[in-house]
Amino acid sequence: SNGGLIDAGLFQGKDSILSGPAGGVVGMVRTGTMAGFDRLIGFDMGGTSTDVTHFDGQFERSFETEVAGVRMRAPMMSIHTVAAGGGSILSFDGARLRVGPESAGANPGPAAYRRGGPLTVTDCNVMVGKLRPELFPAVFGPNGDQPLDTCAVIEKFEALALQVERTTGQKKSPEEIAAGFLRIAVENMANAIKHISVQRGYDVTEYTLTCFGGAGGQHACMVADALGMQRVYIHPFAGVLSAYGMGLADVRTLKQAAVEKALS
């Protein structure tokens, strides 16, 4: 969790509780500095949350962290997390639009995934045309061979637009409703970045927004605009640098180390 390595024989569970996000931060810094950027804001947006980090020449670590209500004293990467991801559920409470904090998860997932899921941020991107089914893998449906379900997304947004009109008297198109949800999600993520930068006295406009994670590329430019940032860097393998991808790599490495130790 502190971004380093440890011998398999010395490994303890507490040292890897946040090793996935930490691996993403290390990968973000290595690729960002290789590209010539020395001031970085890490923007890791996945399915359930967004992790943001600050880098100004050295890794920032915290030595007391609370995870799921448990306080631990162990060196960990300093990472700020907000409940805004591709699977964050959209809702209308009768007065305003809301994004999250609940998530549709992997199952049922977003409405477009053909599992009867609720509307999510991912569905907003389908509705406004940022996610195009013809360019997206056809891995949905009962046999895992169908494209994103645009019809289901449109139907749900039309129903939501009608609900908003009946409640507030304001008539908005399904596309306008989806764009409104996206603005809310972007504002939540921009506020998270302000928390680790502006509120600590750093001028965020002098930094490069280094984007990774499965959903980061869909929202990076909007987040940068909201913060007045001029540069966005997306590595060709940005998805592999995500907390989820790095977490899987950690698990595989530990399993391999355990097998090698047993064989020796």
Image (cartoon, rainbow, N blue to C red):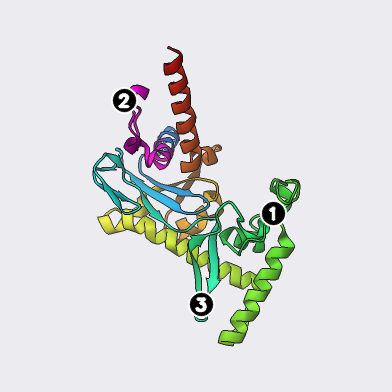
Q: Residues within 10 Å of mark 3 (few under 14, many from 20)?
A: few
Label drawn at residue 93: 3
Alpha-carbon span between mark 2 and mark 3:
50 Å
The kind of secondary structure element at disc 3 is loop
Give, as a three-letter code, the residue at label 1: Arg
Q: Residues within 10 Å of mark 1 (few under 14, many from 20)?
A: some
* Percent x, y of residue 238: 52, 40
The answer to whether 22 is drawn above or below residue 92 in the figure is above
Task: Give the magenta part as a residue range.
Answer: 1-26
**Residue 7 highlighted magenta (yes or no):** yes
Give, as a three-letter code, the residue at label 2: Leu
Q: Residues within 10 Å of mark 2 (few under 14, many from 20)?
A: few
Label drawn at residue 10: 2
Alpha-carbon span between mark 1 and mark 3:
29 Å
Residue picked out by circle 1: 132
Mark 1 or 2: in front is: 2
The residue most toward the top is 264
Give, as a three-letter code, the residue at label 3: Asp
Q: Earlier in the sequence, mark 1 or mark 3?
A: 3
Figure disc tally? 3
- Quarter occupied by residue 127: bottom right
Between 168 and 225, the one nearer to me in the picture: 168
Alpha-carbon span between mark 1 and mark 2:
47 Å
Q: Are marks 1 and 3 in contact (CB under 8 Å)?
A: no
Q: Are marks 1 and 2 in contact (CB under 8 Å)?
A: no
- Quarter occupied by residue 11: top left
Residue sitting at 67 percent across and 69 percent down? Answer: 156
